[in-house]
Image (spheres, grey):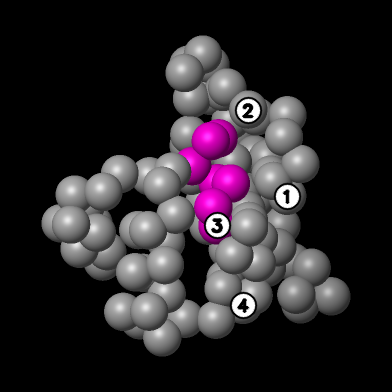
Amino acid sequence: IFDIVDSNFVPKPTMEPYKKLVEKHNIDPNLCVLIEDIARNLKPAYEMGMKTIWIENDEPWAAKFSDSDFINYKTNNLMEFLKQINLLKVA
């Protein structure tokens, strides 16, 4: 778990928390996906090389930037989305 305390209370979407996450856990961003319900928070992850998934919702503040190129995938049902990925992996 990596939370706001781990990032010295620097909030998303500032790049610093994302950098600290990959450094702390020795993560290759190109092998990761970030799932987020606030669209703007996906931009730094995308810029680092992560794939991004936005969980669609009707909150205007969360949907702002939801049509941006830094969002690779969108879903309104994360469980179903993950099931579909698993089916593709098996096929």
- For marks 3 and 1 on the same chain, the one whose residue lies earlier in the sequence: 3
Q: Amino acid at mark 1?
A: Asn
Image position of 80 (left or right of 4):
right
Residue 83 sits inside the magenta stretch = no
- Alpha carbons under labels 2 and 1: distance apart: 13 Å
Quarter-of-image position of residue 83: bottom right
Count residues near mark 4 (Cα–Cα under 10 Å), then give few for <14, some for 14-19, many for 20+.
Answer: few
- Alpha carbons under labels 3 and 1: distance apart: 11 Å
Residue at far right of view = 91
Q: Amino acid at mark 2?
A: Phe
Image position of 40 (left or right of 70):
left
- For marks 3 and 2 on the same chain, the one whose residue lies earlier in the sequence: 3
Is the stretch drawn in magenta largely helix, strand or loop?
A: helix
Question: Which residue is label 4 attached to?
Answer: 31
Name which residue lies at 26% across and 48% down: 10
Image position of 21 (left or right of 86):
left
Q: Is residue 85 above or below residue 36?
A: below
Question: Which residue is label 2 attached to?
Answer: 65
Tell me if I can see residue 52 in this picture: yes
In which quadrant of the rendered image does the C terminus lie?
bottom right
Question: Which residue is label 3 attached to?
Answer: 45
- Alpha carbons under labels 3 and 4: distance apart: 11 Å
Count residues near mark 1 (Cα–Cα under 10 Å), then give few for <14, some for 14-19, many for 20+.
Answer: some
User: Which stretch appears magenta?
Assistant: 39-45
* Disc assigned to residue 72: 1
Element assignment for label 2:
loop
Q: Nearer the viewer, mark 3 or mark 4?
A: 3
